[in-house]
Image (cartoon, rainbow, N blue to C red):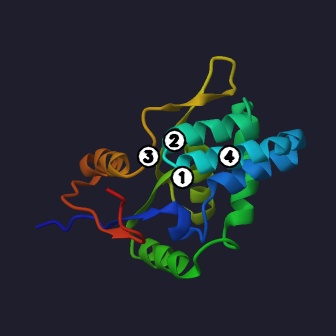
Amino acid sequence: MTAKPIVAIFDLDRTITTSGTYTPALLGWALRHAPMRLLLAPVAALLMLGYVAKLMSRTTLKLWMLRLLMGRVRRATLEAFAETFARSTVPDRCNHDVLEEIRRLQSTGAAVGIATASFDWCARAIGRQLGIGAIIATRSVVAADGRLDFAIDGRNCYGMEKRRMIEAAFASAFGIERAQFFGRPLEL
């Protein structure tokens, strides 16, 4: 009997990292590339309160935050920023016990992946810093003009959708019958 490969899937925000990555990335972008957008931060804070009060969905909040604090940037510019953001995040804002576990698993030959509600551009850059290429994330949309659009390709990678995306990505590739989740349990 051939042993099935070990696949370890980690959540990004508050598991690999010690805090969320989306808002710090957006604020970092605005600070570096569009400081006038920081004037919209109070509006973003009101939107967050609207989400807490259940007046809007997590996806709607995410897209409004993107619109307010980042805008329609060129994909290449965004990717370069994401690399800079990832270098400032890893390892300084990461859970070192989790980083050690990732390295240990990688040294055994396990396939390590990240599944996150964060946008793909941010998750892939952090994954590269950690030597992790298998990334399941909320997929951003790039318009025909090469700029980031205020939309999600598919659905927000959160809760049951995250689980569905994990199963779709890894089940056929590795013949996985069940997955073990490190960190917080999925919010189902």
Q: Which residue is mark 3?
A: 157
The residue under label 1 is 52
In 3D space, how far apart are the residues under numbered discs 4 and 2 (Cα atoms)?
Answer: 11 Å
Q: Earlier in the sequence, mark 3 or mark 2?
A: 2
The quadrant of the rendering that contains the N terminus is bottom left
Q: Position of residue 166 (x, y in %)?
A: 34, 51
| Residue type, mark 4 in image | Leu
- Depth order, front residue of 121/51: 51
Q: Nearer the viewer, mark 3 or mark 2?
A: 2
Q: Which residue is mark 4?
A: 46
Q: Element under label 1? A: helix
Label 2 sits on what residue type?
Leu
Mark 1 vs mark 2, CA separation in Å: 8 Å
Q: Which residue is mark 2?
A: 55
Q: Nearer the viewer, residue 167 or 62?
A: 62
For this view, does 187 lie left or right of residue 67? left
